[in-house]
Amino acid sequence: MDSYVGPDAAARVNQWLNEKGFRRALVVCDINTRFAADILLNALTGMGTRLFIFNDVSLVPDETAVGKLFMAVDPGVDVLISAGAGTLNDLTRYAAHRLRLPYCVFATAASMDGYASSVAPLVADGLKKTFPAAAPLFAAGDTAILNAAPPAMTAAGYGDIAGKHTSVTDWELEHLITGARDFDPLLAHEMREIAEQHNSNDLRLICCTGGGAALPAAGIMESLLRSGIVMKKAGHSKPASGSEHQLAHFWEMRALLRGAQPALHGAMVGAAALVVLRAAEWLISRGPDWAAAYEKADMFDKNIWQSEIRRVFGRVIFCQRRI
């Protein structure tokens, strides 16, 4: 994957597309990122372009959105370009995978690490599932656009990076406990380096400034892209998505089922990472009690367990149909 984060990113996208010989692009945006799509469209030369706009005030990556995007891809389109952040990126790369088209990203916020990923978390029958998707051939972020993004979105990107502390630990624990062979210590080390590049000073700058150069959006964007590349090298999302993501996805599903607007993905991941860390500290402080563990195992009742799962998760657990 090629990437660029800096000034005049739209011109870099145009240069890259022309060098690769693309001739007809579909640019995908929503009403919130239309401004970025217009910047990109004005920069694209030497090729035919069309714009598709999701008119949803709050776009949900569900079956309806997927269907709308599929129907918008005319015959002859040879590249899809997402002008937006998380949800638009997920929808576009899933469509690119299913339609066997190349895909590029024109990022509008340093809000999550999925830009470089090859999977897409989508909502199917109210249940958040991860589907195979296309990794982008090129990802670009314009520093002016990234720095002008709402501070809450950049803070969400910080939260997504903070979640790597628990996700990569979960990945290593799986290997130690089950012997899973997909663990790569070099990739785990790289992911930990990414997470440790950012500290609480970054978060204070994000939350306490009104925008502009003080926001470390470009640096966070670089880290988010690196995180996605690590997932691509691993061939799965485990280095960057562990128990903290399971909590975040559950909170999102529960909000959608209740008709509420979920918080930003990265914000939920950051909060969930704190929950996971607190749980780990509690477990460490208690130490293993094998006698109690064996007693609990002997008392296990599958019917009681299923009843409790239904009580906590509600109808989410009955949503099993795939797109």
Image (cartoon, rainbow, N blue to C red):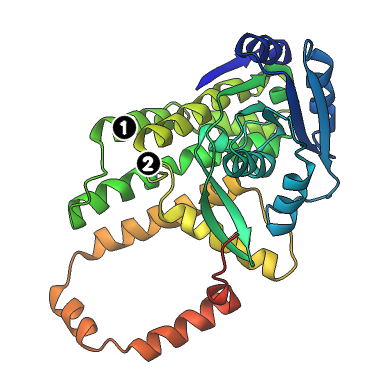
Residue 118 appears in the rendering:
yes
Residue under label 1: 187
Q: Position of residue 322 (x, y in %)?
A: 56, 63
Are dots 1 and 2 in contact, CB under 8 Å?
yes
Residue type at mark 2?
A: Pro
**Would you place residue 261 above or below residue 2 in this image?**
below
Mark 1 and mark 2 lie on one chain; the one further toward the N terminus is 1
Q: Position of residue 72 (x, y in %)?
A: 79, 42
Q: Secondary structure at mark 1?
A: helix
Q: Position of residue 309 (x, y in %)?
A: 46, 79
Say which of 98 and 144 sits in front: 98
Residue type at mark 1?
A: Leu
10 Å neighbourhood of mark 1: few (<14), some, or many (≥20)?
some
Say which of 153 and 229 sits in front: 229
Q: Quadrant of residue 207?
A: top right
Residue under label 2: 239
**Would you place residue 257 above or below residue 9 in this image?**
below
* Residue positioned 38% across, 90% down in the render: 303
Q: Is residue 98 left or right of residue 23?
A: left
